[in-house]
Image (tube, rainbow, N blue to C red):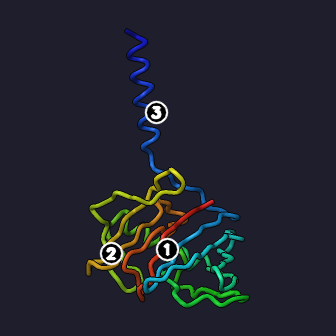
Amino acid sequence: MKKIYGFTLFVLICQAASAQKFVPQIKTGTEMGYTVSLGGQTVGFSLKLSSTADSLKMNWEVDDYGSGSYQMSTKSLQSGKGMYLESPQPNATIQVPDNETMAFISKNAFKDITQKREMEFGDLKYVLSKNQLSNITIGDKQLDVVHAEAVNGKTELWILNNPDFPLICKTKNGTYGVDLLLDYIK
């Protein structure tokens, strides 16, 4: 009888462990790959963090276009109020303005959406979605994300549940019709 209880407990623990969502570590050297959609066309876009100390330096590459880098200050990551949406310039280092972020929402915005259940980002007010189910997977692991919806009901964001690096994993009905989907993170 003890063996049956022990086996049952083992199965339940394994099941609970497999149901846990995944929060990948983000640090210097982390690479993220996205599919960017605009007007029915898609393109591969990758970012690699080459520095996370005093600022975030991200090297980017776009399929059949080129590569370059973005420099985002610690102030941007802490309190940026919107997304930097200018087209990347090949062979250039672009300094992201202190009031904007690139690929992340700010730590302050993340704190607002998780604690106050609302945030303002990119001139839109977002609320925490009641639908917290995520279909965003990396490999066979489901990402632990926060789902935010604009009050106007159009734009949606799925953000990695990581207060230090709140990475945008997916957008729907994004600004200027641009949508992102995280394909990999390593």
Residue at the image position 51 percent from the left and 78 percent from the top: 36
Q: Pick the quarter of the image with the C terminus.
A: bottom right
How many C-alpha atoms fall within 10 Å of the one at disc 3: few (<14), some, or many (≥20)? few
> Measured along the vertical axis of the image, is residue 50 above or below residue 178?
above
Residue underneath mark 1: 106
Q: Secondary structure at mark 2?
A: strand
> Measured along the vertical axis of the image, is residue 152 above or below residue 87?
above
Q: Amino acid at mark 1?
A: Ser
| Position of residue 107 measured from the top left corner of the image (x, y, whole percent) | 49, 70
Residue at the image position 55 percent from the left and 71 percent from the top: 34
Residue at the image position 43 percent from the left and 12 percent from the top: 3
Is 182 left, or right, of 121 in this rendering?
A: right
Residue underneath mark 2: 126
**Residue 112, quarter of the rendered image:** bottom left
Residue underneath mark 3: 14
Q: Secondary structure at mark 1?
A: loop
